[in-house]
Image: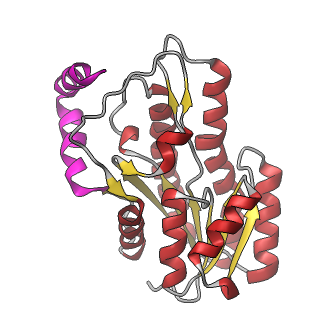
């Protein structure tokens, strides 16, 4: 499966993983629509991605279905089809379950999860009509291993993992493939955009530097080309995921010791 000539839409594309995915698909010859809730930032990111002759940048807040529908309408007007839809928009919330603000929790679910579901529901009829397509959900290893003091964020990613994999089974008959991408620690501005609550403790080891957004983009591209159902990146994160599945108490003991 090549990307040249494909029409790709990426949400949350103004920085980090979203921008890196936009860049790699555009470099491979795809036409691209970049979405972000901030019109200025997404246009600036479009300039960094390049290939201005086959890229568009639009303001779109995925919390509002009407904005997703508007973005899809404009994409169809310009490009006539959507081959790949990437759900990447999201942010974190750093707080304990006991102390986290309910409004902040709900708002994060609206963006990270319900925004992704709305995007899927909006694009599926188009992909069915055109005879196929691919939906890529950018989730997290935190969707496999619940992180203390990031529990709300983990909950959105557990939900995304579940709905994406179930949708993949439902949509296979329509020629629509669903890929779930679960990065570990990534060196982006994600931490700068985390909503900070009352208990700001972390479990990340000091020795872990994280991978680049470009590495996640490359893994996403390979997952698409190989039609995988899930990609965990880096591959070393498969180990803690499998250990947690079989020995959750051991992983929880280790995380409790790392809390600071």
User: Which quarter of the figure is the N terminus placed in?
Assistant: bottom left
In the picture, which quadrant includes the C terminus? top left
Where is residue 117 drawn, in percent x and y?
63, 48
For residue 232, say whether it is visible: yes
**Whether residue 108 is situated above or below residue 24 in the rendered picture:** above
Whether residue 248 is situated above or below residue 194 in the rendered picture: above
Q: Is residue 208 left or right of residue 101?
A: left
The secondary structure that most of the magenta stretch takes on is helix
Coordinates of residue 158 in the picture (x, y in percent): 45, 38
Quarter holding residue 82: bottom right
Task: Identify the colour scheme used.
Answer: secondary structure
Q: Is residue 27 left or right of residue 79?
A: left
Q: Which residues are magenta?
A: 233-260
Place residue 248 in its image quadrant.
top left
Residue 252 included in the magenta stretch of the image = yes
Q: Can you see residue 176?
A: no
Q: Which residue is nearer to you in this view: 203 or 142? A: 203
Q: Is residue 62 above or below residue 95?
A: below
From the viewer's side, name the closer residue of 171 and 249: 249
Name the spot of residue 229 as percent of width and height, x first: 39, 60
- Residue at figure coordinates x 42%, y 71% from the top left: 224
**Residue 122: x and y, percent?**
72, 58
């Amino acid at each position: 499966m090549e990307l040249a000539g494909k029409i790709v839409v990426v949400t949350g594309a103004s920085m980090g993983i979203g921008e890196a995915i936009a860049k790699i698909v555009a470099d491979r010859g795809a036409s691209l629509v970049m979405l972000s809730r901030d019109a200025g930032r997404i246009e600036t990111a479009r300039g960094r991605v390049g290939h201005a002759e086959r890229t568009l940048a639009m303001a779109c807040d995925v919390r509002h279905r009407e904005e997703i529908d508007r973005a899809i309408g404009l994409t169809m007007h310009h490009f006539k089809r959507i081959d790949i839809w990437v759900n990447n928009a999201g942010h974190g919330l750093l707080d304990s379950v006991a102390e986290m603000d309910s409004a902040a929790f709900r708002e994060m679910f609206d963006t990270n999860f319900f925004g992704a579901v709305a995007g899927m529901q909006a694009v599926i009829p188009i992909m069915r009509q055109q005879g196929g397509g691919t939906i890529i959900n950018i989730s997290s290893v935190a969707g496999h291993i619940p992180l203390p003091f990031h529990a709300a964020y983990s909950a959105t990613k557990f939900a995304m993992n579940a709905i994406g994999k179930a949708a993949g089974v439902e949509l296979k008959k329509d020629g629509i493939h669903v890929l779930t991408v679960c990065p570990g620690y990534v060196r982006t501005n994600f931490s700068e955009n985390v909503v900070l609550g009352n208990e700001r403790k972390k479990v990340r080891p000091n020795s872990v530097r994280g991978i680049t957004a470009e590495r996640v983009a490359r893994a996403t591209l390979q997952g698409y080309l190989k039609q995988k159902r899930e990609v965990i990146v880096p591959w070393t994160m498969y180990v803690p995921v499998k250990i947690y599945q079989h020995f959750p108490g051991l992983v929880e003991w280790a995380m409790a010791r790392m809390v600071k």
